[in-house]
Image (tube, rainbow, N blue to C red):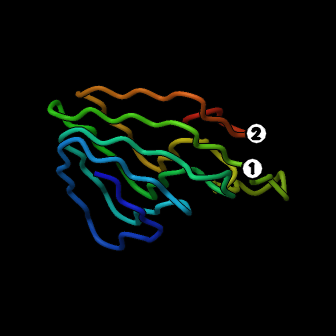
Amino acid sequence: MIFLWSSECHGSCSTLHQGATLLLSAPLRFSKTARFEGKLSVKGSRSFEGPCLFFAEHAFIQSTAEMHFADCHNVAKDEVEEEEEEDADGGAIYVGGNLTVTGNLSIHNCSADYGGSLA
């Protein structure tokens, strides 16, 4: 099953997927804490000005989760060096708080000018 999603989750999110592929046409932003369970593949359909998944707060990849990232390329540039520009950080994932992984996380063919695949 493939989902095309380009949006923002404004509240706390808990997701449970069983073998879904999330094909992004734009970065997906979570403004509150997010928790993931089940098997989910995240793919970028092109390069973005931001990471594929942006978490303003915390992200939890639960023990039952398998998350796979591929082809997430962040081409945003830090315009002002004195200020932190989070959109330029991480190709696959940016986490503003804590990233807790008790399940499986794999990242393949993802890049960014700052933070590599994960920031």
x and y percentages locating residue 85 in the rendered image: 70, 56
Residue position for label 1:
75
Q: What quarter of the picture does the C terminus occupy?
A: top right
Sooner in the amino-acid sequence: mark 2 or mark 1: 1
Kind of residue at disc 1: Val
Residue that sits furthest to the front in the current view: 1
Secondary structure type for disc 2: loop
Q: Report the side of 1 relative to 84 (left or right).
A: left
Residue in the picture at 21% in, 54% down: 15
Q: Report the side of 108 relative to 42 (left or right).
A: right
Residue position for label 2:
113
Residue in the picture at 57% in, 52% down: 45
Residue in the picture at 17% in, 44% down: 18
Q: Residues within 10 Å of mark 1 (few under 14, many from 20)?
A: many
Secondary structure type for disc 1: loop
Residue in the picture at 61% in, 42% down: 91
Q: Nearer the viewer, residue 46 or 31?
A: 46
